[in-house]
Image (cartoon, rainbow, N blue to C red):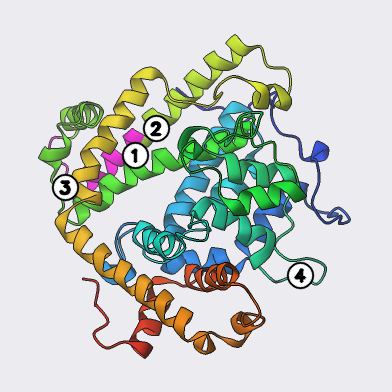
């Protein structure tokens, strides 16, 4: 399927000229629309820069060829722009949501998140999605007139709901929030600026979410092969990858391994993008959408894989989970990383005077929950490298994480 560069704007695309605005009123930019301005603010934030030294799957010094949070984010943004362009959606909003989607991750990825969630178990836990919202609405301190980045309502809505509604209309948690409820930080901000937690996210947020899935599938295959966690023969057992490999093999019988892997990744991304475009077109026609509000009020997602591609996506994840994310080598490193974060939190809780001056401010007067949250905010903002440096300042035997 050829993707046309001049696709007509969809009637249900988000319109920056019709944005619900920002929490703090600002004059419009003379050179950028509201969503482009959001992209630029995210790119220039401290939290975005730190993604360069935060773990995707491998810690930063495993090698320069593996993905970091930053390279993954840029790959998601590229896919999101391609999809948004093909679907006639707003490219700037899709890009802003892709750029911001991982801002809330602490050092060492899910290992760091587990440690912080455990440390905050009595104070609402730690959720990287909620942390991302706190970063862009409060923790970034760059502007004279407001805390955070003062992003548009549509960007905040998409950031919080990129995986779907968080509550029903009565406010009860749904999906992954059914058992433990919505994170307190999200509920607190929602009282300030209602993000319609019960509705579907805008179409551009749905594009960013699918782009994240596509990037994970394709590029974790690449990184896993590069790290020798599995082989080409192993991954060929996954039907969609096997069929791609068969097609490449029939055309390029003498292709060396590195080029063959790149071709697999390239064809997989293309197939997934083309599937999303076709399935979204079918759903849009069936729903007879007339506005962006219709997307939010729909019973289910607009932007999605077909049922066949959903099964292929599940098969890829089912292959990668035990062979990559739960591989003995990766689990050993992540276990050590979890200990680093856990011990750092315990140290700062016991000795808050070791926090930097700007993080110590007011901590003595804060209650236990507020102190714990402030310590978690500081640690969550660390890069992998800085967390290890700080750990070595206070503890003997800091792990090398290799």
State the residue in front, 361 or 273.
361
Q: Residue furthest right?
A: 27
Q: Which residue is mark 1?
A: 266
Q: Which residue is mark 2?
A: 270
Task: Identify the residue at horizontal 25%, vertical 64% (top origin).
Answer: 335
Please report whichever mark, 3 or 4, sits nearer to the chain's N-terminal start: 4
User: What quarter of the picture does the C terminus occupy?
Assistant: bottom left
* Residue under numbered circle 4: 143
Camera-side residue of 10 and 375: 375
> Majority secondary structure of the magenta segment?
helix
Labelled pair 1, 2 in contact (Cβ < 8 Å): yes
Cα separation between marks 2 and 3: 20 Å
Quarter holding residue 377: bottom right
Q: CA distance from mark 1 to mark 3?
A: 14 Å
Secondary structure, mark 1, is helix
**Which label sits on residue 149?**
none
357 magenta-colored: no
Q: Give the structural element (helix, strand or loop) at label 2.
A: helix
Q: Which residues are magenta?
A: 253-268
Comparing marks 3 and 4, which lies closer to the viewer?
Answer: 4
Label whose residue precedes the other's in the sequence (2 or 4): 4
């Amino acid at each position: 399927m050829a993707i046309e560069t001049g696709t007509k704007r969809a009637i249900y695309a988000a319109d920056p000229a019709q944005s619900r605005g920002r929490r703090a009123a600002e004059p419009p930019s003379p050179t950028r629309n509201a969503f482009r301005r959001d992209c630029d603010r995210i790119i220039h934030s401290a939290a975005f820069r730190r993604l360069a030294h935060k773990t995707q799957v491998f810690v930063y010094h495993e090698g320069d060829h593996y993905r970091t949070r930053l390279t993954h984010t840029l790959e998601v943004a590229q896919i999101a722009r391609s999809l948004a362009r093909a679907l006639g959606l707003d490219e700037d909003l899709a890009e802003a949501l892709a750029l911001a989607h991982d801002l809330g991750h602490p050092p060492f990825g899910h290992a760091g998140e587990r440690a912080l969630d455990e440390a905050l178990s009595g104070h609402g836990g730690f959720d990287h999605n909620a942390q991302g919202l706190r970063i862009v609405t409060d923790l970034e301190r760059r502007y004279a007139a407001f805390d955070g980045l003062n992003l548009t309502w549509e960007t905040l809505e998409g950031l919080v709901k990129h995986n779907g509604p968080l509550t029903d209309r009565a406010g009860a948690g749904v999906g992954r929030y059914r058992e433990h409820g919505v994170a307190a930080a999200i509920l607190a901000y929602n009282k300030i600026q209602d993000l319609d937690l019960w509705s579907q996210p805008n179409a551009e947020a749905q594009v960013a979410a699918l782009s994240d899935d596509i990037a994970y599938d394709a590029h974790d295959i690449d990184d896993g092969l590069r790290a020798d966690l599995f082989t080409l023969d192993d991954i060929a057992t996954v039907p969609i990858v096997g069929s791609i490999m068969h097609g490449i093999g029939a055309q390029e019988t003498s292709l060396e391994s590195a080029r063959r892997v790149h071709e697999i990744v390239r064809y997989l991304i293309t197939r997934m993008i083309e599937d999303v475009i076709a399935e979204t077109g079918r759903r849009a026609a069936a729903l007879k959408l007339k506005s962006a509000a219709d997307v939010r009020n729909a019973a289910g997602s607009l932007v999605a894989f077909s049922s066949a591609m959903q099964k292929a996506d599940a098969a890829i994840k089912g292959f990668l989970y035990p062979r990559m994310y739960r591989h003995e080598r990766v689990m050993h490193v992540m276990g050590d990383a979890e200990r680093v974060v856990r011990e750092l939190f315990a140290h700062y809780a016991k000795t808050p005077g070791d926090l930097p001056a700007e993080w110590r401010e007011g901590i003595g007067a804060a209650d236990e929950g507020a102190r714990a949250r402030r310590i978690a905010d500081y640690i969550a903002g660390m890069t992998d490298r800085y967390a290890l440096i700080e750990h070595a300042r206070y503890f003997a035997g800091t792990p090398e994480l290799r």
